[in-house]
Image (spheres, rainbow, N blue to C red):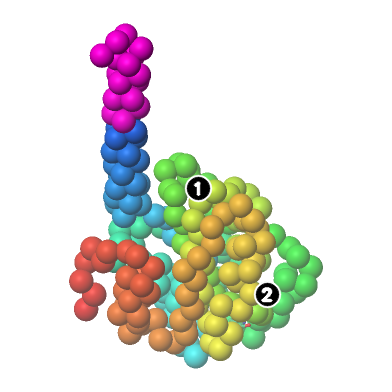
Amino acid sequence: MNIKKMITAVFVLCTILACNNNIGNSKQTTVNDETMEKNEKALVVFFSHAGDNYAVGDVEVGNTKIVADYIHELIGADLFELVIDKYDGMAYESLCELAKQEQKEGLLPEFQDELKNLDQYKTVFIGGPVWWGTYPQVMFTFFKKYDLSNKTLIPFTTHEGSGLGQCAEAVRKAYPKAIVKGEFAIYGHEVRGGKKQIAKWLTDIGYTIQQEEE
Ligand SMILES: Cc1cc2nc3c(=O)[nH]c(=O)nc-3n(C[C@H](O)[C@H](O)[C@H](O)COP(=O)(O)O)c2cc1C
């Protein structure tokens, strides 16, 4: 073998080794990514109104909070509740009127507490009741305050007939750079016996249930 042929042979060998190495790396990256996504902690951001409500009466825990708690129990997601006390103790009809007014005027009511360490979550569930066809205005306050671009967002609602209403669309509009998928709606009056439904939804969208549902 002359020098030229030897150099060519060494070059070809190096190229093959480099390619194999790349293939190996890319496979490993994929596996690692998948593993990371499965094990990574998700966040649930939600609003829920306890008190006088349609179909369930005067409840101590709001319907959407029950769903958020299930998600926490079933896949270990962290919770961030948008707490707002202006609706406390209101009768259902008065709350409906106030909510309609807030929506009409595009008001953005403040909620308590700050959300910290948002960077640690790649996936955020976004949940609320349907109020007049979409999320309550306080959800829009959250959308304005926090940037969830480049995350995966999973909208869910509790409702009494509207399903998702305009909620998933509202999330898409607020975060055009996010991946919005896996949306889910459940009747508010069904959540108290609805843990299995929530577990099925979570399984359907790729989660492994950590705790067996009753
Ligand atoms: C102000 C207000 C407006 C509502 N508007 C709707 C609606 O447009 N469509 C619907 O299906 N349900 C509507 N509901 C019913 C709630 O979406 C449902 O009871 C929900 O489960 C309440 O969740 P929460 O207990 O977490 O607040 C409304 C309830 C309230 C209080």
The CA span between labels 2 and 1 is 24 Å
Figure quadrant, ligand 1: bottom right
Measured from the top left, where is residue 65 in percent x and y? 43, 70
Determine if the magenta segment contains residue 12. Answer: yes
> Which residue is found at the position 45% from the left and 77% from the top?
63
Q: Amino acid at mark 1?
A: Leu
Q: In the image as oriented, which residue stretches furthest toward the front?
A: 1
Q: Taking 80 as reference, is 69 above or below it?
A: below
Element carrying mark 2: helix
Element carrying mark 1: loop
Q: Nearer the viewer, residue 170 or 10?
A: 10
State the mark number for residue 115: 1
Name the residue that disc number 2 marks: 99
Marks 2 and 1: CB-CB under 8 Å? no
> Which portion, as a residue range, is magenta?
1-17
> Which residue is found at the position 22% from the left and 66% from the top?
211
Q: On the picture, is 96 further left or further right than 53?
A: right
Q: Taking 161 as reference, is 196 above or below it?
A: above
Q: In the image as oriented, which residue stretches furthest toward the top?
A: 3
